Amino acid sequence: MDLSLGNRRALVMGGSRGLGKAIAKALRAEGAQVAICARGAERVAAAAAELGVEGLVCDLSVPGAAAAVVEEATRRLGGVDILVVNTGGPPPSLFIDLDDSAWRRAFEGLWMSSVGAIRAALPGMRERRWGRILMVTSVAAKEPVPNLMLSNSLRAGLHGMINSLAREVAADQVTVNALLPGYTLTERLQELRLNEAVLAATIPAGRIGSPEEFAAVAAFLASGPASYVTGQALAIDGGLLQSI
């Protein structure tokens, strides 16, 4: 299938490793111009050189940083047609261990960075009457994962925003969708210190997913042929979620 991305420009947030890097690689392979951003300058530079993309340094926990990086990507690429909002997950935590400052940091880094990036990219998409907004969330948004109170809470709310925004901009030929990764072989899985063999036994597919499998779905939703898919929350999880 021709995904018709040869003349499209993409910004992948959190694109120096894991799912973000895999998405950037998939979009680049389909011919899109791509910029990635992440917090660590060395890691961004290495990933950008490896993938043949633009590398931008951005700390999404800083107010206004997400909008600024979209503006910089727009300057370098000439526009942003595809925005992949991939902010990473807040640290593991239980409700009893969280104070107000922890909630505010998570809200700024996860919620407001998403809002800021979308707000900056959306006017150009609507003007050109073509755009794709993909938000990487988590299966935790639908079924809470133990010890992930911040992620469980905030990501569920983001799905409400995605569904509402999709309806607002559908007539402008801009699609807005969420991608829910299940257990996938990334650095994040290692950071959570989860037992991979035990996890695999809980997944109907019988294994943990690969970043490339996730990225293939993202590339399709970013494409021309996916123009009638919007307002959806699609799990790439090997059948882990029990509800439809």
Image (cartoon, rainbow, N blue to C red):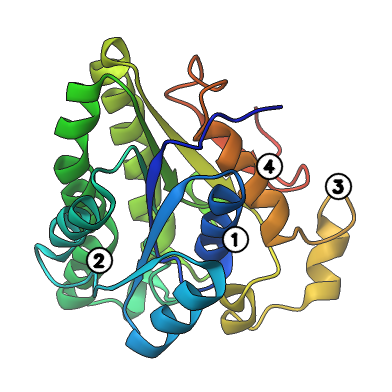
Q: Position of residue 140 (x, y in %)?
A: 52, 53
Q: Which residue is mark 2?
A: 109
Q: Position of residue 61 (x, y in %)?
A: 21, 71
Q: Is residue 61 left or right of residue 189?
A: left
In this rendering, is residue 221 above or below 136? above
In this rendering, is residue 85 above or below 93? above
Give the mark nearest the N terminus, 3 or 2.
Answer: 2
**Dot 2 alpha-carbon crowd within 10 angstroms: few under 14, some 14 to 19, many 20 or more:** many
Q: Is residue 2 left or right of residue 203?
A: left
Give the mark nearest the N terminus, 4 or 1.
Answer: 1
Q: Which residue is mark 4?
A: 241
Instruction: For marks 1 and 3, give the CA distance.
Output: 24 Å
Q: Which residue is mark 3?
A: 204
Q: Amino acid under label 4?
A: Leu
Q: Residue at x 51, y 71 (%)?
A: 147
Q: Amino acid under label 1?
A: Ala
Q: Is residue 86 visible?
A: no
Give the number of the mark in front: 4 or 2. 2
Q: Residue at x 26, y 67 (%)?
A: 106
Q: Position of residue 161 (x, y in %)?
A: 28, 34
Q: Which residue is mark 1?
A: 22
Q: Quadrant of residue 23?
A: bottom right
Give the mark nearest the N terminus, 4 or 2.
Answer: 2
Instruction: State which quarter of the image contains the N terminus.
Output: top right
Q: Are marks 4 and 1 in contact (CB under 8 Å)?
A: no
Q: Are marks 1 and 2 in contact (CB under 8 Å)?
A: no
Instruction: State which quarter of the image contains the C terminus.
Output: top right
Secondary structure type for disc 1? helix
Give the number of the mark in front: 3 or 2. 2
Task: Looking at the picture, tell me which residue is in the foreground, 56 or 134.
Answer: 56
Q: Amino acid under label 3?
A: Pro
**Dot 4 alpha-carbon crowd within 10 angstroms: few under 14, some 14 to 19, many 20 or more:** some
